[in-house]
Image (cartoon, helix red, strand yellow):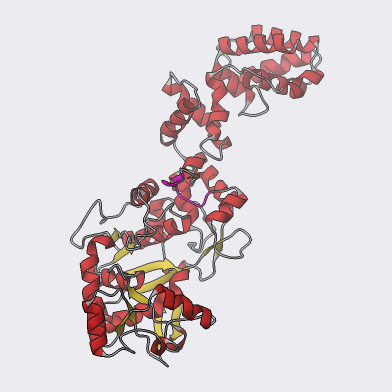
Amino acid sequence: MEQKVRVRFAPSPTGGLHLGGVRTALFNYLFAKQHGGTFILRVEDTDQNRFVPGAEEYIVDCLNWCGITPDESPEKPGAFGPYRQSERKASYKQYAAQLIVNGYAYYAFDTAEELDAKRKEVPNFLYGQATRMQMRNSLTLSPNEVTDLLAQNTPYVVRIYIPENETVTFNDMIRGDVSFETNLVDDKVLLKADGMPTYHLAVVVDDRAMEISHAFRGEEWLPSAPIHILLWKYLGWADAMPQWAHLPLILKPDGHGKLSKRDGDRLGFPVYAQNWTDPKTGDVTKGFKELGFMSEAFVNLLAMLGWNDGTDQEIFSLTELVNLFSIARISKAGAKFDFEKAKWYNHEWIKRSEVGVLMAPVHNLLTEGGIEVKDKEFLAKVIELVKDRCTLLGDFVTQTGYFFNTPTSYDEAAVKPKWNTEKADFFENFGKKIHSDLNAIKMEELFKSLAETSGFKPGELMLPFRVMLVGGKFGPGVFDIAVMLGVAETQKRIEKAISFFN
């Protein structure tokens, strides 16, 4: 019988959601959906010192915006809850105690001061095989001393006992066989002094309890793999261990190191999915959504960071990604983040989107920009006309605003130096001759004919005409604009501009 696919995205609610985290969620989602499986959101909130109010809700909002909504989560519990680690606290202590009884873990009573002293004494100090017998723990203390310390509620942590001279090997779905020498691994803390588990213990216990079949996580977690594999073995669950896939890093644009929030701040692009407001400082970190990215484009560009389908195709819908996704096509090498390429994806998605998809966001942006839209049908025509010119959704404000409001200023430098009375006469004459039966092609023919009669090359007059209607040197075909504006509005704008330039 084939194993049922159950995968989890397990973020910590400590702040904004980095695009690397969203990509991990996306790859989990794609794999689950392709195999008719279950995609789970599990909130890893055991580090209470780093917990940030509102961060969990923010993560849920980001996933919903991307269209990768979990099948099970704190908001949508299934049969494997609770879905917050802080609500599973009782179970971790039980397994830590089991590991101690079986000799796979031990109590460590060292104080923070004792550990600091040791770090000063021993360069690159690691609590493990070389040092554990010099420390204050249940390996060096007598059973009576340990019992007394526990009875007195002396603070302690529980550490895993890493064996010497062993090799831990596992098969990674992306990297193949990966091996670690245990002599290079330290005795990580499994249970903290506050009774909360560390990631190492919690991830194993929860993956077992939730029957996780495949675990996708970032490459930075590879060094932790031997600890987790040993825990699966020590807890007697080796046969139930999920298959691992360590995803390649998303790199800085120059390829040197993992992409960070600091890089985004320095280079002027977002690294978070949505705006994140720090509840302590009120500082806002910009997100892709608020910058004007479509969720479809954001998901598409993330999928292509470290994966491709083996063809030259670059534009994929979420449905296509589900159908085509393959772990065999995930690269082992890190993927450089290119913001210009990210914008290209968004431009392509805007161009390909139906007007109905763009209506609501564009209408909202125009309203926020103080532009009143009275006729939705007219807005739909405008969007169709200008969408090929928009890279970010915010570009629609610039590219459509003049359809709703007469320009209040003009690009004088583009017109004034070559303006004369002959040009003023031409436009006055042209304004009188346009009528509602003219489409864009017929209007252009009339324009060129009158220009020739007036002794002008049409090219000399096209730019002034555009500036009259738009206010600047941008927008779609100028005759398309004039037809959209209608005869009366076009005439009004020509008259207003003539008096301005004269």
Tally of numbered tags:
0
Q: Quadrant of the C terminus?
A: top right
Residue closest to the eye, 279 or 399: 279
> Where is residue 90 shown, x and y percent of the image?
21, 68
Q: Is residue 280 inside the magenta stretch?
A: yes
Quarter where residue 89 is shown: bottom left
Q: Position of residue 357 (x, y in %)?
A: 41, 36
- Up the image or down, 344 lies above or below 163; here it is above
Q: Give residue 402's quadrant in the image.
A: top right
Q: Main secondary structure of the magenta part?
A: loop
User: Residue shown at 58%/35% (left/top)?
Assistant: 389
Horizontal side of 423 relative to 103 (left or right) equals right
* Left or right: 38 as drawn, with respect to 25: left
Horizontally, residue 252 falls left or right of residue 41, namely right
Residue under the image location 33 percent in, 60 percent down: 45
Compared to residue 445, the image places residue 203 above or below, namely: below
Q: Nearer the viewer, residue 345 or 12?
A: 12
Per the rendered image, the range of residues in magenta is: 270-281
**Residue 58 locus on image (x, y percent):** 37, 48
**Residue displayed at 47% across by 28% down:** 368
Position of residue 95 relative to residue 163, above or below, is above
Residue closest to the eye, 422 or 139: 139
What residue is shown at x 67% (from left), y 25% (from top)? 472
